[in-house]
Image: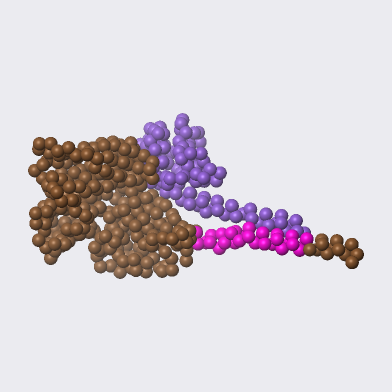
Amino acid sequence: MAATIVFSSLLVSIPINELENVYDSRNLRSIGLNVLVELDRDGDLGRLIAQRNWTELSRRISIMLPLGVSYNLTVYNEEGKEVNSLPISGGGVLGEDIVSIQYLVVERTNLRFYVVRLQLAWVR
Amino acid sequence: MPSASMETLLACYIMTVLILSSMVGMSVLVHPYLESQLSRYSVDSSRSLAEYWLLNPGSPSDWGATLNVNLTAFGLAKSNFQVPFDLDIDKVTRLNQENKYHLSLFEVFTALGMEDRAVRIRITPIFDVDLNLTSQNVESNSTVYTFKVSTKRLNLPVTATLHCYVIVEDYVDAVTSTVQGEGFIEVEIPNSLNGTALLIAFARAEPRAISFNVYSFRHNTSEGPNQRGTFIRLSPLNYTLYAEHLFPEESITSVKVFTYSYNFDLSKNSEEGLTETYTIPRLLEASPMILVVTGTNGSRSFAEWVAYPQIPLDFGSSFEGERSASNSLSCVFVVTINSALYECRITLGEA
């Protein structure tokens, strides 16, 4: 009986870590979407993708994200194929709990659609 | 007592100790879980509140530009914003306690509708510009000043394009440069001028992240540069600069506006008592404006300045102390004011 109680106490404690992660995830999702919307203002995000200017795109994301957040960005074309030839990432290795945000971008000059997937994690 | 009874008693004793200790252990483990459940709603509502203030214009929707206003609902967004987190330049400015027409903490907290919670709103440029005078070389007709410029974000270097201006009395000179975290710039001022000089530095990092700093120094005079607000109190609001003289005998030499790309004189609008008003142009450029007033008080030359929007802004509770710092939630946003990007951090204390 005692063993059962000790074991059940361990089971009950597991969701504590999960709850913390839920809070972090919501915060990160909001930050990521905020950054993508600001990047896309005036069509800059679509223009940089069309120019395949991954270095500048990475630099802009780095300056807009709060310090302590690592990221990885992948760009897909209309057929779902990966477009970026170089990894667009920064802030170190992504942590355990990664948030993924998908964002539809329109490149305004040639009217091409891209799907941007931004993965974020707090650096621990 | 028979040995069987002893063994039974011992077993019961061990069982009881184990059960009690496991109950204590479990309650210790479960306590934060239960606390988390209780505070879950609080965390969610705090973040939603912070977003609400940045996505809504408040009531009345033009409370930033209207001088005598009864603020009933708080919100910092522009009245007819097209994109999220686009803040109104005057609403942000009116939270700055240095502005003559600022709203009091009481007015804002009443409009927030949550007097039982501490709130702090900070709006700052995304990165910092530091200026330091490293040397000065006096030549026959002019003096050359060398400044060390640092563009950093929490000590991490930021590559930025610099547009600097130096102003003394009515004299203005501009310098452009690019720095990768650190660099030097030189400015030259004629020796025919004297008084407080200002070096205004704008640093731009794409996309539209603009930071600025103003360095005050003395030129060709033994008197030190004047502190801000010594001679004239400057309060920008609704694209009007209110310049309030703090000494009746002083006179204004020039009133100028500086942005990342432009600088020009402001025209005088009116004069009432000790307060003069100047019209600030509505510029489309993504840049904060630095408004500079130069003048004389007797034989002393001075220079006063103010930023429009009036940032950096630090409004509300201080959250000093370990307890209040630990019982608070901080949300970070990238916001836009006049097309330039800034960082907004809203901290909410527990109810």
Residue at 91% x, 64% y: name it: B2
Could you tell whether A123 is left or right of A112 in the image? right
Query: Residue B283 appears at what percent x and percent y?
Result: 23, 49
SS majority, magenta? helix
Q: Is residue B129 visible?
A: yes
Residue B162 is drawn in which quadrant?
Answer: top left
In this picture, is B328 found above or below B220? Answer: below
Q: Residue furthest right?
A: B2
Question: Residue B194 at x, y = what percent?
Answer: 12, 47
Q: Position of residue A28 (x, y in %)?
A: 48, 49
| Residue B272 falls in image quadrant | bottom left
Residue found at x 10% / y 36%: B140
Please tell me which residue is depicted at 38% across the width and 61% down the height of the picture. Answer: B318
Residue B36, above or below B132? below
Farthest residue to the top: give it.
Answer: A85
Foreground residue, A24 or B181? B181
Membership of B17 in magenta stretch:
yes
Q: Is residue A11 above or below residue A93?
A: below
Q: Considering only vertical position in the picture, is B266 above or below A91?
A: below
Question: Which residue is found at the position 21% from the left and 45% from the top?
Answer: B199
> Is B32 positioned to the left or the right of B151 in the image?
right
Q: How many marks?
A: 0
Specify the colour of chain B.
brown
Give the camera-side residue of B188 and A30.
B188
The residue segment tinted magenta is: B14-43
Is residue B106 located in the magenta-colored stretch of the structure? no
| Residue B328 position in % (x across, y down) | 46, 59
Q: In this rendering, would B317 be left or right of A1?
A: left
Q: Colour of chain A?
A: purple
Residue B94 visible in the current orientation: no
- Whether residue B109 sits left or right of residue B216 in the image: it is right
Q: Indicate the colouring scheme.
A: by chain
